[in-house]
Image (cartoon, rainbow, N blue to C red):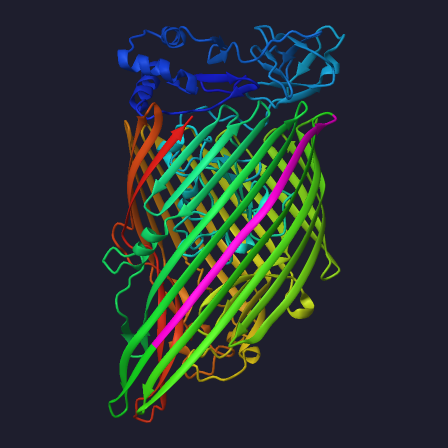
Amino acid sequence: MNLFRTRIILLILFMYGAVLSYSQVSGFDSFISRISKQYHVDLAFAPELIPALDSIRNSGFKNANIEDLLHQLLSGTNISYQIVDGNKLMLRRESTPQRETGSIELKGIIVDHEGVPLPFAAVSLGGSTRGAFTDENGYFTLRVSDTSGTILVSYLGFKTSSLPVQSFVGSGHPKVRMELNTIPLKQVTIIVPFQQMSFNRDAQSIDLKGYQFFSVDQLRNGNSEQLINGITGYTQFSSDQGIRLRGSEAENSLVLMDGLPVYDPYHFYNIFSAFNGHYFSSVKLYKNNMPVEYGGRVDGLISIDSDHDKAGSKLILDTDLLLSSLAADWAISDKVRFTAGGRVSHSSPLNKALSDSSSVSNFSNRPGYFKDNNEYTSTQQPTFNFYDINLGLRAGIGYQSNLDVSYFKSRDHLETQIATAFETTEHGNEIISVKQNIDNKDKWQNEGMAFNYQSPILNKSTFNVNGFISSFEKSSTYESSLDEFQHNTHHVFKNSGLQNSHLQTGGLKAFIEQDLPGNQEYKIGLDLQRHKIDLLAKENDMSYLAQAQQEFETTLFGEYRIALLKNLELTLGGRLTHLESTSGIYPQPHVLINYFPDQHWTLKTSYSKNIQAIQQLTLENRYGREVEFLALSEPDAGYPVLKSDKYMVGAGYSTSNLNVDVEVYYKKLDGLINIRALRPDPSHDDHTSPGEFYRLFRGDGWTAGMDLLIAYKKNNFETTVSYTLSKISERFDMLFNGQPFSPEEDRRHQIKLSADYKMGRFTINSLLTYKTRAPYLSLVKIDGKDGIGMGDPNQSFRYLPPYFSLDLGVDYSFNCFHQPAQFGISLINATNHENISDLAHIGRVSRDIGMGSGDSGLYVTQKTELLGRTFNVHFRYLLK
């Protein structure tokens, strides 16, 4: 079997088969490197070998060959080894499978696809701790108590086989023929990358593995919560609040936390992660075709899962100057586990940092200033706090069935005070004095529960059923007071506004997936979802948006995957959705093709059509502030169904040290909605009713670009480079005379470079981020041009400056009371570059500057600055 390179690979065989893992302990880095170089091996070891390694490291090792090293390493343990095929060294823990006595003795022989016996294959009774390994001739013996269970057979490089116990009763030595995995195996390496990325070539997804939950690695490599922000292609506009997958709206991507849909889980312009990286161990991103059982979004899927370890109970604590978090995993019994996690911001230190007026301020609180003769920039003072809670219960039922239950709750509160005070002159040098205060308050919260039940049925079939209920509420209020002294007269204007959205949703889904002979598999199921949203928007107690919307989605979905010619894989599938609001049926085909020329190269392409009944509604209020809410499809009220067509072609190259992935994509959108004023006027002089001032616009758009991702590791050095070239275009019939324009989320070039270097107990890391300028609608440029309905977009936009940030960090790992701990310091935006998230127009002062020019407006603007130079200290501690 030509499945491995000729270098010896150390494998740890665990209870149910070969589990390839690596747990690199701080302090062992140079030791492991010496072993690898001296014996020409790639080393993977289990946590129970740490004491043995420690003793060898302290006493030194002078073994002539790998067998002498293994004899010293494994002496006095219950782990034995066997060299197979001359190039694979397989280690097994002899006492792991419980060879319990039973009334029924099962015997058999395990062979490969050509009939050659497989030595040391793992054979186990599903849902139990009973197991055995085959001998050198592929034979095994296993005792069981009854014949109602299932036998699982695992071997590296082959698909896991599942057979009923009954097939081994009274049959002598039945032969089990294993199916070769058609996807070439990658070499087992000791790489645990800084970004910890693995590529699923079947599903065309990238898995950002945050932790092998509560392993020692997590204390060295930081939080998985940082990984999404480290990949340019996933944070289309990282200075904004939300993760965008090739689009302009964060809510156009489905975010699942242990199967529970969550909405707007982002915290204060991504200063804080959307999820607890100590609780969740896996983040999977689907930029193109998401798994067919998921739908209802036009962009992509972010699936966050807490796939915790099955060994022991653990607790991890993490605290820094701005945030504290914890995560716990409690093994109630062999089959039942309870997990809990939580985070809370430190309000006083956080708000002090945000309001600091020093040169290292996050949000500069210096006095306002005139940007030019027609624009004055105000100051802002934000305060923010949040908390979130995760709970989980995982139970094994019967032999192989599993039930997972999860709960999530989060609450955010952001308040921003904007102050303006300046004087200017008009014709005749008459002084105009302006004082303005605006108080914005935003609150949003998620709460929900989800369950998932999985059970094997028939032969190689699995039945899945899951459901959820969730609630999301967001409210935004503002109060404005303007005192203007002009022509020896005081004018006082007061204004207030409210926008509120409350979503209640629930769903139930069931599907069957089965492996078929000949490297085929299929999936078929039914998805039911009900949504209810209450929308309300008022200005000065007058309503201009009041909607009570409901939607019921019924979807049939299916998928068929087949491997052709041993290196070509074709997946055909789709969803068929009925929407109650439109009484329409929407077919959504999915096509995915993978071609594997060899074990290093992958060629891929995909197409999918998607619809979205819950979409993000952007509302730009009188002061130019964009507030995002959720709305349901209701064509009669002007809310269309959002639709997309997505195309992608790409290629990947992978070796033990290098991963390269490139994708070229195009996405077409139809059904965009936006609420704004045709004639923006923040002057308080426009007395038009809110219902006439604000209009609902519908449009379409497209996104095109290229994503390039390169990850490289050499010894103790790791680096990742990601680059995105993209363009986002939108068009609305009643805006800019129907001409296309780019939204604020459009940045043409984005690049991120991360580097990680390990020196014993120290880890030095860095992250450089650069993004080109972003457009925004400038009221200064359209002043006197009768609004934006017939305006020229090329003459209506200005640009925010490019985004640049250099982040540096040093971590030190050590033991505290015999438990792993880590202390670290970091410096965010080390160059103190001024990065702007957005710019809003909050006021307009009319001036007569003479010379026959008439009224020339002076606009008051407010810009949201992101993190300046910020110092932070963290401490992590693991209790086992």
Question: How many numbered circles does the render carry?
Answer: 0
Reply above or below: 110 against 811.
above
Let me know if residue 269 appears in the view. no
Say whether residue 467 is visible.
yes
Looking at the image, residue 149 sits to the left or right of residue 677; the answer is: right
Residue 819: image x %, image y %?
36, 25
Please provide the residue range marked out in magenta: 436-458
Between residue 622 and residue 658, name the one nearer to us: 622
The image quadrant where one finds the N terminus is top right
Is residue 327 or residue 297 the one in the foreground? Answer: 327
Question: Image height check: is 557 above or below 314?
Answer: below
- Residue depicted at x 30% and y 24%: 27
| Magenta stretch secondary structure, dominant | strand
User: Which of the 4 image quarters holds residue 291?
Assistant: top right
The residue drawn where x is 48% and y is 17% is: 12
Can residue 487 be found in the magenta stretch?
no
Q: Nearer the viewer, residue 822 or 644?
A: 822
Q: In this view, does 542 lie above or below 518?
A: below
Residue 787 at x, y = what percent? 47, 80
The quarter of the displayed image where residue 400 is located:
top right
Q: Where is residue 75 in the image (x, y as percent from the top left)?
A: 40, 6
- Quarter of the image with the C terminus is top left
The answer to whether 137 is drawn above or below residue 294 in the figure is above
What residue do we see at 49% from left, 34% from top?
601
Rendered location of residue 167, percent (x, y):
74, 14
Residue 314 falls in which quadrant of the image? top left
